Image (cartoon, rainbow, N blue to C red):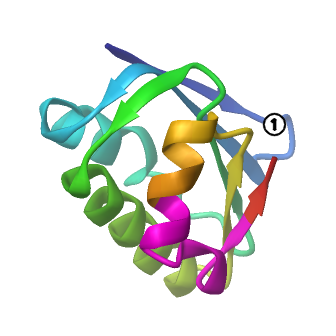
Amino acid sequence: MTIKKYVSENKKEVTLSIEERFDFSLHQSFRNSYVNCEQQNTVFNIDLSNTSYMDSSALGMILLLKDHADKLQGNVVILKPSDSVNKILEIAQFHRLMTIEN
C-alpha cells in the first residue's frame, strides 16, 4: 500500500495516487501528502485507478482533504475509481460533494 504524490510545475495541481488498499493504515501518510500544500486554488486529484479496496476510514480521509481544499478555495477530484470503489463512493453520495471522473 503506497501513496504516490505528483505536484504540477505551477503547484496548482496535486495528484495523490493510491495503490491497492485505501484504509486506515494510510491515514498518516495520506495526511502528510497534502497538509503542507498551502497554494490557493489548488486542485487535489485522488487517482483511484489502482485502488482495489476502500473502507469508511478512507471516505473520512477524503473528507478531511476536502476541508483542507475548501480552506484554500480549491477542489478535490476523484479520478478513475474501479467499479467496486465507485459503488462505495455512490453509496456515500460523494458525487454530491466533489467531481468523480470515471
Tell me the residue at 75%/74% (across/down): 41
Tell me the residue at 41%/38% (across/down): 33
Q: Is residue 51 left or right of residue 7?
A: left
**In the rendered structure, which amino acid carries the disc numbered 1?**
Ser
Residue 12, magenta (yes or no) = no
- Near-viewer residue (66 or 37): 66
Residue identifier under label 1: 8
- Near-viewer residue (72 or 86): 86
Q: Is residue 40 left or right of residue 53?
A: right
Q: Is residue 67 left or right of residue 70?
A: left
Residue 99 drawn at (x, y percent):
74, 69
Dot 1 lies on which element?
loop
Compared to residue 2, the image places residue 41 above or below, namely: below
Residue interval drawn in magenta: 89-99
Tell me the residue at 73%/44% (across/down): 79
> Looking at the rendering, which quadrant does residue 100 occupy?
bottom right
Outermost residue on the right side: it is 10
Compared to residue 77, the image places residue 32 above or below, namely: above
Compared to residue 56, the image places residue 80 above or below, namely: above
Tell me the residue at 59%/50% (across/down): 86
Residue 55 drawn at (x, y percent):
25, 46
Residue 62 drawn at (x, y percent):
41, 60
> Looking at the rendering, which quadrant does residue 70 occupy?
bottom right
- Near-viewer residue (39 or 63): 63
